[in-house]
Amino acid sequence: MKILITGACGFVGNCLVEALLENCEGLEIIGLDNLSRAGSEINRSNFKKQGVTFIHGDIRSISDLETIPPVDWVIDAAANPSVLAGKDGSTSSRQLIENNLYGTVNLLEFCKQHKAGFILLSTSRVYALKELSSIPIVTDGTHFSVNQTATLPQGLTVNGISENFSTTPPLSLYGNTKLASENLAIEYSDAFDFPLWINRCGVLAGKGQFGRPDQGILAYWVHSWAQKKPLRYIGFEGKGLQTRDFLHPKDLVSVIKKQINHIGRGQKPIISNFSGGIHSARSLLEMSNWCENRFGPHEVTSDLSPRPFDIPWMILDSQQAKKEWDWEPTTPFEDIIEEIAQHSETHPTWLDLSIA
């Protein structure tokens, strides 16, 4: 089987390349990346010894895709993953839309031409910002949690945000490009009869992630703490109680193996959540407590000013994935954060490289 992975030199794409090669026999992988992200050249250097065919190209360029041979599946991991993208000044709104939406359209045209299956790695940020911000929250020791005594919106369960939670805009420019990509992928799959799976992922984290405050927050926090770089709690009274769950990208491989070998359309839901869930959920304050035990004390300042698109609590409910795919995350939070901590010790200049 031949698979094209876009964004192959990014954190998620590279993790999938390694994990798929380790867990799938007879697999041929083509990796596509435009190498625009600082640090991506490091991941590219391993491809030759792994037997991965690397193509330096951009999914926004139709001519770059024309040179790629037919494949059986496309896994789209090429995206600007920042919820602030298009608004923070580092990326224009047009660049974001061209990369995250128009690039997806080009890949769907590629799948249409070659009858290749398509796996879109989507995001929890397709869920409605207004409804997420309105979830009844209580302070529960060192983190926020849902007030179970309040009336909860549709799609919110004891396990988190499920697939039928509202996706009504506003979301963010980033979230809308991913939601539009989902909708177009469904239309293309139906109109041109190729298989499709949309995997909405929670916060992905692990060693080698390019850490920034607006993406790769766990890697950013651990590396910054280890190197005694400035850290701050932003918004929500500056206490660091905002809470997310974390998933290692390699945990997606077990379901991707099933998806690329699944026979029969319409037997399983196209869209499913995949996340670390409530057991992997941690607040910034809890991440700080872990780092203090691991590296020693470090000051974290408070900034009471709210930041666009920030929400106090987000945990995805992956019960549908468990039911339909017999899937559960296998890498606990403690292993993920320790993996990052060890990486920070062997790569003390990682933040300077990956944020450049």
Image (cartoon, rainbow, N blue to C red):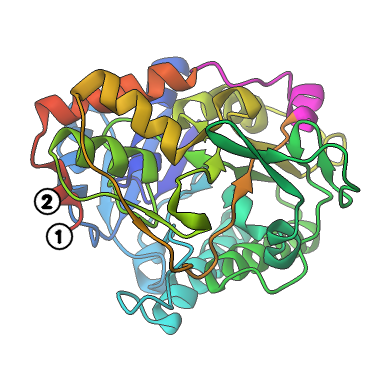
Residue at 62% across, 32% down: 260
In the image, 231 versus 262, the foreground residue is 231
User: Image quadrant of residue 101?
Assistant: bottom right
At which x and y percent is residue 131?
Answer: 76, 61
Give the magenta-colored segment's residue range.
Answer: 319-331
Q: Is residue 135 visible?
A: yes
At which x and y percent is residue 168?
Answer: 77, 69
Residue at 52% across, 74% down: 102
Q: Is residue 65 magenta?
A: no
Residue at 58% across, 25% down: 257
Left or right, residue 146 beside residue 352: right
Q: Is residue 116 visible?
A: no
* Figure check: 318 above or below 194: above
In the image, 29 versus 179, the foreground residue is 179
Residues at circles 2 and 1 in contact by the CB criterion of under 8 Å = yes
- In the picture, the disc for residue 356 is 1
- The residue beneath circle 2 is 352
At which x and y percent is residue 249?
Answer: 46, 32
